[in-house]
Amino acid sequence: MASGIKDKVAILGMGCSKFGERWNDNAEDLIVEAFIEAIEDAGIDKSQIDAAWFGTGIEEQHVGKSAVPLSMALRLPNIPVTRVENYCASGSEALRGAVYAVASGAADIAMAVGVEKLKDTGYGGLPQRSRGAVNDLFWANASAPGSFAQLATAYSAKHNVSAADLKRAMAHISIKSHDNGSKNPKAHLRNKITEDKVMNAPMIAEPLGLFDCCGVSDGSAVAIVTTPEIAKALGKKDLVTVKAMQLAASNGREAQHNSWDGSHFVTTRAAAKRAYQEAGITNPRDQISMFEVHDCFSITELVTMEDLFISSDGRAVNDIMDGLFDADGKIPCQIDGGLKCFGHPIGASGIRMVYEMYLQMHGRAGERQRAEEPVFGMTHNLGGFPHQNICSLTIVGKEGA
Amino acid sequence: MEVGILAYGGYIPKSRLQRDQIFKAHAWFNPGLKGLSRGERSIANWDEDSVTMAVESARDCVAPDQRENISAVYMASTTFPFQDRQNAGIVADALNMKSNIQTLDFTSSMRAGTAALTVALQASKGAEGPILLTSAENRMTKAGSALELTTGDGAASFLIGSGNIVARLLGSHSESVDFVDHFRGESAEYDYTWEERWVKEEGYMKIVPTAVNSVLEKTGVSASDITTFCFPVAARNVAAGLAKKLGISEDAVADNLQSNCGEAGSAHILIMLAKALQEAEPGDKILIASFGQGCDALIFETTDAIKTVRPNTGITGSLANGRADSNYNRFLAFNDGLRMDLGIRAEVDKNTGLTTHYRNRYMAQRMVGGECSKCGTAQFPKSNICVNENCGAINTQEDYSFADKIAQMNSFTADRLTYSPDPPAYYGMIQFEEGGRLMSDFADISPDDELTVGMKMRMVFRVKDYDTKRDFRRYFWKAVPVNATQKGSE
């Protein structure tokens, strides 16, 4: 395996807009809001940015195609700007482009911008749209919650977990994220909820009820990255560096070959092994300080605990109910509220996850700041469906860790 | 060469709308409908049309390995989904038949079913192989009309030719009379009907006896020798009245299935024939007579093979496989009888590129996937590179039909977010026992059904999407739980 990018790239500055129903803002307004925070945090002028990557998932709902909308919104000085799309992992893809550019030496300072404007459809949930001309001929009439709900039935069958026990663990996940989101001023959903409320909520796609589903939000997030040397030359201390970035794409095995049981993510497991190796992490359960996973649905978070090798197979329910992943637990998960409550503006989400790690490591997370100083933070950004998806993992941490 | 019926099958959609629910909705306007408010009628699901029902009945009639020599596919209906695109051709495609066959649609009369049968029997004498005849009907009826109560949906299929026939044709006779008891003009959605008493006295009771007496005379069969008399009309006691007038035994009068199915238009006489065959003994003489601008009368005699050549499910099995449905509003919604607010999600454009559709027709209409000739892995859709990670061979996949394979269900959901005409949308991962899998829509699931991981599923041909802007519909296959009454492919 390649030697990887560990400690070759440092985060120079980050920004994140308020997520939510931003009725009066265009995507460009959200981009500028996140950009201003990031560029001020980086302490540079935008003319110092050598290249930018722009992540959006459903561009037809807002900016349209290409990277031009980003370049125009920020009046970038004709630098290379690339638009990337990889389902809900589009934000991580933008970050990967920027990080790789710096790691390769092609750019000294690079920027990743993610944005999504989803609340212009006239209805709740993700936009219903064509899946592609050929796919439309035979794909099931599946929504996002319906696709991820499949995990629940397959997981229950495989691990012999009763539907009721699974639902309770899923409820715990959502309650925890609402608790965390209530402490986050930029979060879309800031209300606390109870188990009763989760259990009695309207069914969206069995067994996922309303509170098993994340918020669909408008928002933007920005990361500016550079080399550790340049960061230090710019006066930055206590650097947060990139330890690993790994991506895995389904190749059709889950969707078309009978070797997958439907209860876990093949891609997450493949990417996690590579990410831990790249970061030099041998025991993630003990070494990862905190993580943000792609909790589009409560069941996704549940199985991802096992796919990231934090919980052993079939034990996620126990770890969740033991409070291992609560804000004051051993390894907090979604300490910012996650997709569930911070919100899920698709193209921004991957960068938003890293934003929280960055804030926590700099002790700037406000009311939700973790007392114990984090060393390694991991983000998990997933796009697509359990049976065909993109998984993007990022590990960041203290320089030298 | 003696020709006759080689095999037969039938299909009645699962849902049975309770007539008292229809009557309850309209009693305020037309209390006279009370007389028709007993029993139940079959209703096609939202994703069924005459083509899909025809396909299901044809599958019931001929197994995949018996389709090789079929020389023609005829389809009869007055409710074809396409006015200009051969509907029999869609049926043939769904049955994964070769292109060197004749396909023909018969329509425009309640006699279309028997017309197709008569033509098939004549043509099969000189045909290179048996003719598959299928007939299905999915009639639109006005809310509050008598037809809404008396009609039903269903299909029947027959394999016509020579050889090991289950019933031989003794003779047939056709009377053509432009007697217009009802009609549906070029631009009309619904039938326009005339007074029933006149239809009975001047139509049924005069035209049918002429045709039946002629066929009795031609064949030398005496009326009293008729074992089963099938007459499809819904009106009460007409068949019995005709039998009395013709000298046919009262016991021979076949049930017109008003109580549990309803009259399925031009297909109904063939549905009754399929049921009569399923219940027949060798040597039975079955007289069928249709009515529509005249009358076709045919007499069949069953052979010893009637005991051994059986449909998978047949009309009898299909009728027994019903589910009572009390939701008249849903029936109206399915049939555009209500202006429903379907929500913005329903507005997604369902345009189908005809190039895309043609290029992928084996996948989309026949459910043909690939089988790797190197490692033997069955996979759907067929692709250039084998999905088996331990193989990965390039360009090794041979056509492999999934339509008749049995699958087990690995996971599922009931989705209330995605747009479905009948929410929740049920779908899940199904895994074929002999390899291959698919995230598949499920059909005919009711919230009362218990879905469990591991349960067996079979595939059915259904409408995948309606393109209401262009009046196109695309078909694909969906999974349904295997019933105890169905034998499946093994």
Image (tube, coloured by chain):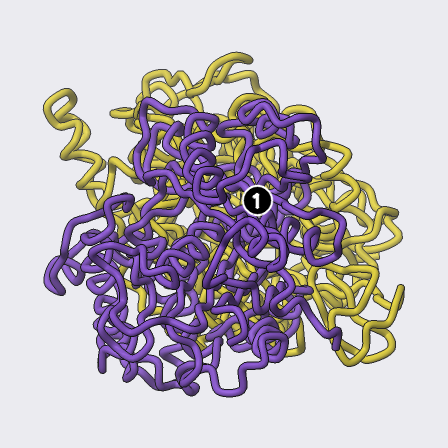
**Is A62 situated left or right of A47 in this image?**
left
What color is chain A drawn in?
Answer: purple
Answer with the quarter of the image where residue B490 lies.
Answer: bottom right
Q: On the image, numbered disc 1 is attached to which residue? A: A112
**Which element carries disc 1, helix, strand or loop?**
strand
| Residue A90 image point, x, y percent | 56, 48
| Residue B278 image point, x, y percent | 51, 64
Q: Could you classify mark 1 by the number of other residues whose Cα lies within 10 Å: few (under 14), some (14-19), or many (20 or more)?
A: many
| Residue B306 image point, x, y percent | 60, 69
Residue at (23%, 59%) from the top-left corner? A368
**Is A171 situated left or right of B94 in this image?**
left
What color is chain B drawn in?
Answer: yellow
Q: Is residue A3 above or below residue A217?
A: below
Residue at (22%, 69%) from the top-left corner? A172
Q: Is residue B421 above or below residue A26?
A: below
The answer to whether residue A217 is seen in the rendering is: yes
